Amino acid sequence: MGGAGGELDVFDAGRCASGYALGLAVGRRFASAIRSRMRQDLVLREQLLPFASTAAARPLLAALQAANSGRYPRYWDELLGTADGSGVPLLHVILVNFRKEIQPFIPKAGGDHEEEEEGEPDGDCSDVLIVSDSTAIAAHNEDGHVALLGHTYLVRATLPDGLSFTAYTYAGELPSCAFGFNSNGVAFTLDSVPPMNDEISPGAIARNFVSRDLLEAKNIDDAMHRICSPSVSVGHSYNLMDARGRRIVNVETASGNRLAVHEAGAAPFFHANMYRHLQVKQVQDENSMSRENRAAQCSVDSKETALSLLGDTADDKYPIYMTGPTLHTLCTVLVDLDDKTMTIYRGNPKNGDITLVLPML
């Protein structure tokens, strides 16, 4: 199992004949991590599972299953394989993969639907993007709920058509709701965003399925098509990279096929967990706003200054680099389009403690 300070477990599933075969191989290899995550995930235990047993949940879960298995049958088969391989109930696997699409519809204590900070398993990430004459990088903090420590791993797989991908994966979930790349030189990192409930389309396409599809993109235009063509439930922020074309774009999406595209340039572009371009009614996230304000005070023009920014702890309440008690920076990743590498760091990225350097091409 991977974790803060620990080694990141890498599994090469080899060439997989089907989605089910890939899921089964990953489920078997990481059965203990997946079972442990399901036991310790309080969002699953205290919110998703109790809600799933209610009458209100049934039509929502049925609609999510129909929409996503219908559009992405291979990825649905991956979920089935992951459940079978790990010995975890399929319902648990479905719930953690659909949590972003389910949580807004769970009645909150006191009827407040907008209290999303507590118990959110992966509510925060930070990215800084630069494409200048001398530097073409995307640096990303993968922030998650403390329960995810020790419950992440790296999956490599080769598809029947010969395409291979490498993806940082949360135990029991599709690769990847975090970051990854493929042998076409397409890479991505992801940031969650908080649309208000009336901006969400219930029972539509789920974020985990879109990001799994991204791992098969042929180029950056194909990646944008895969993000923008499905009618999504919640929406997301995608940082797309093309190692062959030396391009980085940020794409924000929302339900109703809405999107906004920002091409990264020489001026550093920082993205936390609120929409920056797309006009969407959203929850005002104090954590994100604090990180954005802090980033605006820092000069970034190189790998080193980008990593320094992502390691910043100047704000005691909402540091960019998080060490708990609820949210934790699980790892930091730097994609360098000139070196064509993805480098994963453990601990504070300022310290330069490299876990893995992965060649993208």
Image (spheres, rainbow, N blue to C red):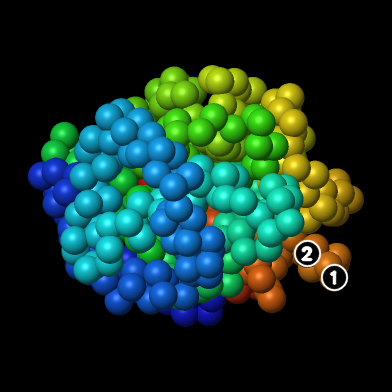
* Residue 319: mark: 2
On the rendered structure, is 322 left or right of 56? right
Name the image quarter holding the N terminus: bottom left
Farthest bottom residue?
6
Q: Residues within 10 Å of mark 2 (few under 14, many from 20)?
A: some
Say which element carries label 2: loop
Across and down, in percent, residue 190 comes to 55, 45
* Residue 96: mark: none
On the rendered structure, is 77 left or right of 269? left
* Residue drawn at the location 14% of the way across and 43% of the way down: 18
Q: Could you tell me if the residues under marks 1 and 2 are in contact, i.e. CB atoms within 8 Å?
A: yes
Q: Which amino acid, mark 1?
A: Asp
State whether residue 246 appears in this view: no
Say which element carries label 1: loop
Is residue 131 depicted above or below 126 in this figure? Answer: above
* Residue 316: mark: 1
On the rendered structure, is 299 left or right of 206? right
Q: Which amino acid, mark 2?
A: Pro
Across and down, in percent, residue 352 comes to 61, 69
State whether residue 123 appears in this view: yes
Name the image quarter holding the C terminus: top left
* Residue drawn at the location 36% of the way across and 60% of the way down: 92
* Residue drawn at the location 27% of the way across and 66% of the way down: 88
Farthest front residue?
55
